[in-house]
Image (cartoon, grey):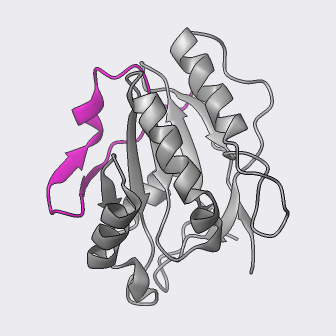
Amino acid sequence: MAMTASTMLELGTSEPDFRLPDTQGHIVSRDDYKDAPALLVIFMCNHCPFVKHVQDHLVQLVKEYQARGVAVVGINSNDVAGYPQDRPRMMAENAEKSGFTFPYLHDETQDVAKAYHAACTPDFFLFDADRRLFYRGQMDDSRPGNDLPVTGADLRGALDAVLAGCRPPAVQRPSMGCNIKWKPGNEPDYWG
């Protein structure tokens, strides 16, 4: 399985806007969370083994930090023509089965992924109360097959720091996963 790394967008970057449908067809936007102390945007999908590897732990981590006021959205930007298991209907089934407590959004045009410079699944982007990029990188060091436990240590550290009003973590390691499945001819300029 091929691995792709996060682009590591510059810290302090203003959060790009999004207005995307969730699995029930409701439009969800960045501004829906304007009063949250932090917003975590996760680029993810159904079929990626890297997402599957962390998904159960991620669902629990999200619940913990939602209880502390953090807003969370998942975004699937994959080409569903080439990867039908990532279609919105399958997204809805995965969200229900896995107990998602956050909206799982479909980025059909892939414009949102491009605006965030998202590259892989999972790819994590944490924004502070002013919606400036505070953290981008891995959840932890665990990967399929490396026998390290899924702890969420890196992402937890960043979430704790943003909620405490601290500076961003000095060490931020790129997330690793499957590349976003771009529609043919729609690859972004930062790709490859």
Figure quadrant of the C terminus: bottom right
Figure quadrant of the N terminus: bottom right
Q: Is residue 172 left or right of residue 29?
A: right
Closer to us: 84 or 99: 99
- In the displayed structure, 171 sits above or below 192; it is above
- In the displayed structure, 175 sits above or below 62; it is below
Residue 70 at x, y percent in the picture? 41, 28
Residue at (63, 40) in percent of width and height: 136
User: Predominant secondary structure in magenta?
Assistant: loop
Magenta segment includes 92: no
Closer to us: 105 or 64: 64
Residue 50 at x, y percent in the picture? 65, 66
Residue 47 at x, y percent in the picture? 52, 77
Magenta segment includes 16: yes
- In the displayed structure, 187 sits above or below 84; it is above
Residue at (46, 44) in percent of width and height: 41
Which range of residues does the magenta coloring cover? 10-39
Residue 106 shows up from this direction: no
Outermost residue toward the top in this view: 165
Can you tell which quarter of the image residue 48 is in? Answer: bottom right
Residue 19 at x, y percent in the picture? 24, 50
Residue at (39, 87) in percent of width and height: 84
Can you tell which quarter of the image residue 133 is in? Answer: top right
Residue at (34, 62) in percent of width and height: 95
